[in-house]
Image (tube, helix red, strand yellow):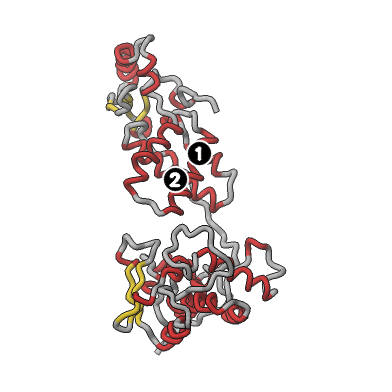
Amino acid sequence: MSPRPRNKANKPLPDNLYPANGGKSYQYRHPVTGKFHGMGVSRLNAIAAAKELNTMLIPDNDLVAKVLGNITVRQHAKWFMDNIAPEREYKASTLQMYQVQIRKLEAAMGDVAAEDVSVQDLAQLLEKYSPRTANQIRQVAVDLFRVAVSRGLRADNPAEATLKRKEKKARKRLTQDEYDTIKTMSPLWAQNAMDLALITLQRRSDVARMKFENIRDGKLYVIQEKTEKYDTGYLAIAVGPRLDKVIKRCRDDMASPYLVHRRPERKVKDRAGMDHWTQVKPQMLTRAFAEARDESGLFDKAPEGERPTFHEIRALGIKNLRDKGADPQKLAGHSSAKMTSNYDSGHDEIRWVEVSAE
């Protein structure tokens, strides 16, 4: 897409002059520094001042100033990834998501000046994608343009004005009977992982990282990978009878520091992220669960994208605790009850709330 110097709403105004406060006043953007300066409420005075400033700040032969005053979305995105992203210490998965969605933004409007991107531009882009993808693009765009505002590249954030789409959960929830059937079809190490996930409500990456040395004083200590920056991510899980039974089952004749471990069928070529030859990577848990699920035949009629994954064990565990009248929020490591409810939604069973009118 070729760059456009002004959007239609601002075309009648001189370069670098923009309406502010809903059109009640005007502001001038310095063509070199990118900073905005208030120009009052008089349209005539603002236009006259802007023309004079443009003459002083952008002489016809000053091409560098013109370029500096027209930072494109692609240039700003690169600056963001080079300067802002490293400071935030994103997880690898989050960083990858940003890179993927930024590529989509760049393909659609990379050569457009950051100041000229409109709400309509972004809305039209988001309409082309599924709700989940559109929401990820919107999340990244909101962040990018928020930083653009702080850099003085524009006065508002057009991404914030777009609508967040409602994501309909495609995957089927897992029932206890289905879980039991899939578990019997799984190898012992995968059964251990499944039970640890069901009882502790931890994600696959946290289950894969559980070590015997983290069990002390009757507790299993877990630092959740996704939330380790927050208080909700540091858990000391009491080892009750059910969890103790699984832990004892994990203590087999194979010397391994990890609760979930296995003897590789062949030499592991990719040892990235592994510190022991018996270690099980998170994606191996997903693969083993999917193989047992498909072997069971329980979901043969369901499309591939709707079949439950290892992650659904967490949702089943939350449901089971709720059925017993317990609050799973702290154990799940969720910062809000709403987040926990998202995992509990979608089950067919009705949970009756016992009340008294007396």
Q: Residue at x 54, y 44 (%)?
A: 126
Pointers 1 and 2 in contact (CB under 8 A)?
A: yes
Secondary element under disc 1, as helix, strand or loop, is helix
Where does the image place residue 270, in percent across and percent down from the top left?
A: 51, 58
Identify the residue position indicated by label 1 in the image.
105
Q: Residue at x 63, y 78 (%)?
A: 185
Secondary element under disc 2, as helix, strand or loop, is helix
Determine the residue located farthest toward the right in the rendered image. 301
Spatial distance from mark 1 to mark 2, Cα to Cα? 9 Å
Where does the image place residue 346, in percent across and percent down from the top left?
A: 55, 70
Q: Is 110 rendered above or below residue 12? A: below
Mark 1 or mark 2, earlier in chain: 1
Q: Residue at x 40, y 39 (%)?
A: 145
Which of the numbered marks, if any, corresponds to residue 140? 2
Please say whether residue 155 is visible from this viewpoint.
Answer: yes
Where does the image place residue 67, in percent across and percent down from the top left?
A: 40, 21
Where does the image place residue 62, in percent across and percent down from the top left?
A: 36, 13
